[in-house]
């Protein structure tokens, strides 16, 4: 900044202080060519001017900056200044032409207590921004008897909710009629989740009241009452704002020490989670994705479920095919290594022998003979056509040849053969031809 720029401000900021709307709305006025400085039209952003030396006109009318003014409001429950109608509501509270008005800090609709109303944006920013270390004191009333352990749990949860917030330890006050009052001093905005935090530990919030903001205290102001600061209060407020701007303010008391938030068996609720997981180490979106990637690469996952609890996707697929079981065609199924022909085209010599015996067909005993694939019924429930032929009938063997006869083509009477050793019920096998 050169010597000529001392005392100059950006043009849109000057227009906003004069009551022409927000800075964005004032930028639109400048770009539209409706603003002049010393009778010269300005249409570029970034131009600076001195509001007390330069002549600034909007649509040919000279602007007049109002003098800084400050009011203290004891906000009652139900009032809100956080919506688009806030500026209009403030104008109704403050009578007169003071330009654009706004509050220093915010309170939700169900909170009450001290609010500063002003048209001085510099002071409002210094009182509310966390970097300037300005204390805000809240008196809260909760249900039940708040113990020291409950207060420590609330502090732990509040510290994480404020992302390493800067505040002093809770000061427990008096207990009256099943309710407890405590005082909380923060150096930034109080989070909206404060009510939920207290409720989690069994202490529903009945009332939130701000009693102090920097050098200003609520005192005995009536609920809903508003008053203008006198000359001494304004002087003290501006001196405090200068100290904050020049970094001369420090924390009034030691802040919460996160070292006492170490995990232990007695700590309850609102524990800080490890990066990348939600809950235990075996669950969570990132853990699940890593487990599926490891599973797809063929490496052991170390997270096997019991057989009865596995889902369809958990069951390993056959190494013989990458396709799901329901989508495999006949060509995907492996053929027997003893024959390349389809099953329906195989002859008797192409059919694989039973793995239970390596003996030639004619030398097998009764226990070596393979079971018949013609019937899955138990032996006692077979019909005459399902039952195997008796080895005592040589004439039938002569008529049918040495090959086995398929089920459904026999009309001979029921004849049971001798019981074979090692066989199971229902395991009818093929009979070798007579040599």
Image (cartoon, grey):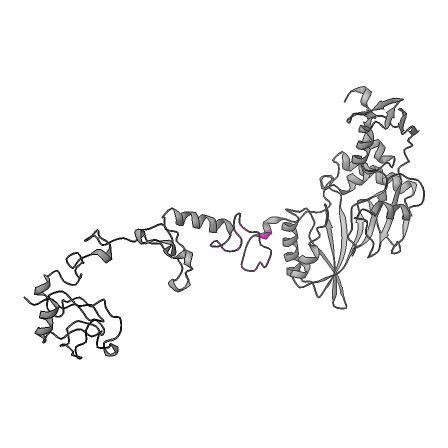
* Residue furthest to the right: 96
Coordinates of residue 76 in the picture (x, y in percent): 84, 56
Which residue: 57% across, 51% down? 272
269 inside magenta stretch: yes
In the figure, 239 relative to 423: above or below? Answer: above
Q: Quadrant of the N terminus?
A: top right
In this rendering, would 412 be left or right of 266?
left
Coordinates of residue 255 in the picture (x, y in percent): 67, 47
In the figure, 21 relative to 281: above or below? Answer: above
Q: Quadrant of the C terminus?
A: bottom left
* Residue furthest to the top: 3
Coordinates of residue 421 in the picture (x, y in percent): 14, 73
Which residue: 71% across, 62% down? 204
Coordinates of residue 222 in the picture (x, y in percent): 89, 56
Q: Quadrant of residue 373?
A: bottom left
118, 201: nearer the viewer: 118
State how many labels appear: 0
Q: Main secondary structure of the magenta part?
A: loop
Q: Which residues are magenta?
A: 260-283
Q: Quadrant of residue 325?
A: bottom left
In this rendering, would 37 be left or right of 1?
right
90 inside magenta stretch: no
In this rendering, would 375 be left or right of 148?
left
């Amino acid at each position: 900044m050169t010597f000529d720029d001392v005392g100059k401000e950006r043009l849109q900021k000057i227009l906003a202080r004069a009551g022409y709307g927000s800075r964005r709305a004032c930028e639109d006025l400048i770009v539209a060519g409706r603003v002049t400085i010393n009778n010269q039209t300005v249409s570029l952003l970034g131009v600076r001017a001195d509001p007390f030396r330069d002549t600034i006109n909007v649509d040919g009318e000279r602007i007049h900056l109002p003098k800084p003014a400050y009011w203290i409001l004891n906000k009652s429950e139900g009032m809100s200044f956080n919506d688009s109608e806030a500026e209009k509501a403030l104008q109704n509270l403050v009578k007169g032409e003071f330009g654009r008005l706004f509050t220093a800090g915010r309170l939700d609709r169900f909170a009450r207590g001290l609010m500063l109303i002003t048209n001085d944006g510099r002071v409002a920013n210094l009182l509310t921004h966390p970097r300037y270390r300005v204390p805000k004191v809240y008196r809260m009333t909760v249900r039940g008897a708040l113990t020291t352990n409950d207060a420590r749990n609330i502090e732990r949860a509040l510290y994480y909710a404020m992302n390493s917030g800067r505040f002093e330890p809770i000061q427990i006050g008096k207990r009256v009629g099943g309710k407890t009052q405590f005082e909380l001093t923060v150096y930034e905005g109080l989070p909206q989740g404060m009510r939920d935090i207290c409720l989690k530990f069994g202490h529903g919030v009945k009332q939130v009241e701000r009693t102090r903001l920097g050098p200003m205290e609520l005192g005995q102001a009536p609920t809903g009452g508003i008053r203008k600061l006198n000359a001494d209060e304004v002087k003290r407020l501006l001196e405090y704002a200068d100290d904050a701007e020049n970094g001369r303010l420090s924390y009034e008391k030691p802040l919460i020490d996160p070292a006492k938030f170490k995990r232990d068996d007695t700590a309850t609720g609102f524990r800080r989670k490890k990066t990348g997981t939600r809950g235990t180490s075996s669950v969570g979106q990132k853990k699940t994705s890593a487990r599926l990637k490891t599973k797809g690469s063929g490496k052991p996952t170390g997270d096997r479920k019991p057989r009865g609890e596995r889902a369809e996707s958990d069951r390993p697929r056959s190494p013989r095919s990458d396709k799901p079981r329901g989508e495999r065609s006949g060509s995907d199924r492996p053929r027997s290594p003893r024959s390349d022909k389809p099953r329906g085209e195989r002859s008797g010599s192409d059919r694989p022998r039973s793995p239970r015996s390596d003996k030639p067909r004619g030398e097998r005993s009764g226990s070596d003979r393979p079971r018949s694939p013609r019937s899955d019924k138990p032996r006692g429930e077979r019909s005459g056509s399902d039952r195997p032929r008796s080895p005592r009938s040589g004439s039938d063997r002569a008529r049918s040849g040495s090959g086995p006869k398929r089920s459904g083509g026999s009309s001979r009477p029921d004849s049971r053969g001798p019981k074979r050793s090692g066989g199971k019920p229902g395991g009818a096998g093929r009979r070798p031809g007579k040599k």
